Amino acid sequence: NAGVTQTPKFQVLKTGQSMTLQCAQDMNHNSMYWYRQDPGMGLRLIYYSASEGTTDKGEVPNGYNVSRLNKREFSLRLESAAPSQTSVYFCASGSDSFTNYGYTFGSGTRLTVV
Amino acid sequence: EDKVVQSPLSLVVHEGDTVTLNCSYEVTNFRSLLWYKQEKKAPTFLFMLTSSGIEKKSGRLSSILDKKELFSILNITATQTGDSAIYLCAVDQYNYGQNFVFGPGTRLSVLP
């Protein structure tokens, strides 16, 4: 089925460990996004990529790095995990950054940092 | 297969109209249903619903959940041009599911 695939679905890390969240879409969308969702705060944009080869910071980029490997894949890396990064992470893709209807979200990654 | 369906997918109204957006779902391990308003890049959280029949309100927006019939509605009264956005419905699941299942969204355009 077409859509956005995120892995892993769940992860527990110790403080200071690193990990990479993977995201892939098969809809030929140019734009891809990483969000985090915390209770009572809704979704906050971490990084986005308007097209292959470009990435830009969102609202809460500190502690994260991203890589747009190709048009399909957009990964999010935590170099040194902190408890404040405990959250649910969503990847999304869209056919246009601002105007086109068509955002598709992955199913999320529940990350706990202890 | 878990799924969330929203209707209509697109809606055009004039300022002052009242609109009702629909979200129906078929998911396992239901925990809660969430509504978001999406303008530009980052969706804004509107409501989280966990119990049937309890209306949540915020200004001109209100929402209610029916867990027996597996749907939720989002009402917007006296619409304004600033309400123009994509409204996303998502269902949160307990562990061992997809975690979250998002609907495709309803694109609302409010004309002056």
Image (cartoon, coloured by chain):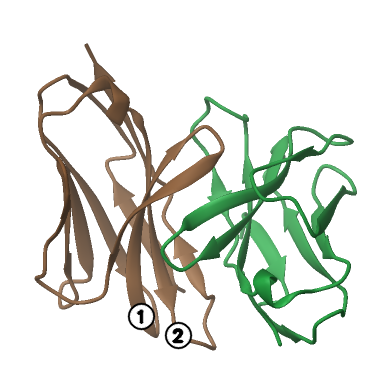
Residue denoted by label 1: B30
Circle 2: element type: loop
Give coordinates of residue B68: x percent, y percent: 15, 78
**Which label belongs to residue B4?**
none
Give coordinates of residue B65: x percent, y percent: 18, 67
Q: Residue furthest top?
A: B112
In the displayed structure image, the side of residue B34 where residue A18 appears, left or right: right
Callout 2: 10 Å neighbours few (<14), some, many (20+)? few
Relative to residue A66, is residue B12 depicted above or below? above
**Which label belongs to residue B94?**
2
Q: Which chain is brown?
A: B
Q: Mark 2 near mark 1, Cβ–Cβ under 8 Å?
A: yes
Give coordinates of residue A32: x percent, y percent: 70, 44
Give coordinates of residue A76: x percent, y percent: 79, 59
Q: Which chain is green?
A: A
Relative to residue A16, is residue A5 depicted above or below? above
Q: CA distance from mark 2 to mark 1?
A: 6 Å
Look at 68% across and 42% down and name the residue there. Answer: A58
Instruction: Specify the subunit that label 1 lies on.
Output: B
Look at 11% across and 62% down and name the residue there. Answer: B55
